[in-house]
Image (tube, rainbow, N blue to C red):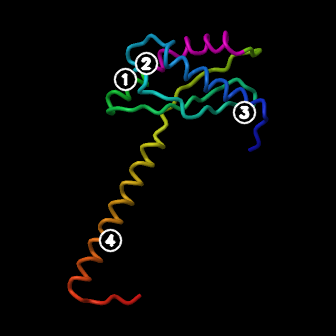
């Protein structure tokens, strides 16, 4: 699906503005500053709907609490976006948790563990003097 330059530009603007709001604008205690970052914004072609993906650092309880805080702040975020970005209509905003960073960490740790286990297995085979033919 090809997206227009304008859609990409507006999505980038939304990402930057919401990131700034997370740092200083949202007064909800459930949204801990520094623990939440905007990873991506997917904007509909008609600029009416914005999916804002956020990465949240912390326990699963803290993540659930932060998402609840973000959900309750959607009206504030939308009105702030309306003031900060000049558009005919401000898009509807939905916050979604982006767990791709966590999945990446899990994959990396699994790969590292497999690599270590392989090295240990090869080391043990070498100690016994066995040869392995491929």
Q: Residue at x 39, y 60 (%)?
A: 111
Name the image quarter holding the C terminus.
bottom left
x, y percentage for residue 101? 46, 43
The answer to which image quadrant residue 126 occupies is bottom left
1 or 4: tag closer to the N-terminus: 1
Q: Earlier in the sequence, mark 3 or mark 4?
A: 3
- First-in-chain label (4 vs 2): 2
User: In front: mark 3 or mark 4?
Assistant: 4
Q: Are marks 3 and 1 in contact (CB under 8 Å)?
A: no
Graded by Cα atoms within 10 Å as few (under 14), some (14 to 19) or many (20 or more), the crowding at tag 2 reads: some
Distance from label 3 to label 1 (Cα)?
Answer: 30 Å
- Counting residues from the N terminus, which is met first, the one under dot 3 or under dot 1? 3
CA gap between label 1 and label 4 equals: 41 Å
Q: Are marks 4 and 2 in contact (CB under 8 Å)?
A: no
How many residues crowd around disc 4 within 10 Å: few (fewer than 14), some, or many (20 or more)? few
* Start-end of magenta stretch: 70-85
Which of label 3 and label 1 is nearer to you? Answer: 3
Pointer 1 and pointer 2: residues touching (CB < 8 Å)? yes
Marks 3 and 4 sit apart, C-alpha to C-alpha, by 44 Å
> How far across and down, in percent of the image, does residue 72 sit?
47, 15
Residue bearing mark 1? 65
The structure residue drawn at horizontal position 71% and vertical position 26%, both measured from the top left corner, is: 10
Residue 8: mark in rendering: 3
* Residue to which mark 2 is pinned: 69
The residue identified by callout 4 is 118
Task: First in sequence, mark 2 or 3: give its number.
Answer: 3
Q: Is residue 106 above or below residue 63?
A: below
Q: Nearest to the eye among marks 4 and 2: give it.
A: 4
* C-alpha separation, residue under disc 2 versus residue under disc 3: 27 Å
């Amino acid at each position: 699906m090809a997206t227009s330059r304008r859609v990409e530009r507006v999505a980038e603007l939304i990402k930057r503005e919401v990131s700034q709001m997370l740092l200083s604008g949202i007064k909800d205690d459930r949204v801990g500053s520094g623990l939440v970052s905007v990873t991506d914004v997917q904007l509909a072609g008609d600029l009416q709907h914005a999916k804002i993906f956020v990465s949240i650092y912390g326990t699963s309880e803290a993540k659930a609490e932060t998402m609840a805080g973000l959900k309750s702040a959607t009206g504030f975020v939308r009105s702030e976006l309306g003031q900060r970005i000049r558009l005919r209509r401000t898009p509807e905003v939905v916050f979604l948790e982006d767990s791709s960073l966590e999945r990446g960490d899990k994959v990396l740790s699994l790969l590292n563990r497999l690599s270590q286990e392989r090295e240990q297995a090869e080391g043990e085979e070498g100690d016994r003097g066995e040869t392995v033919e491929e």
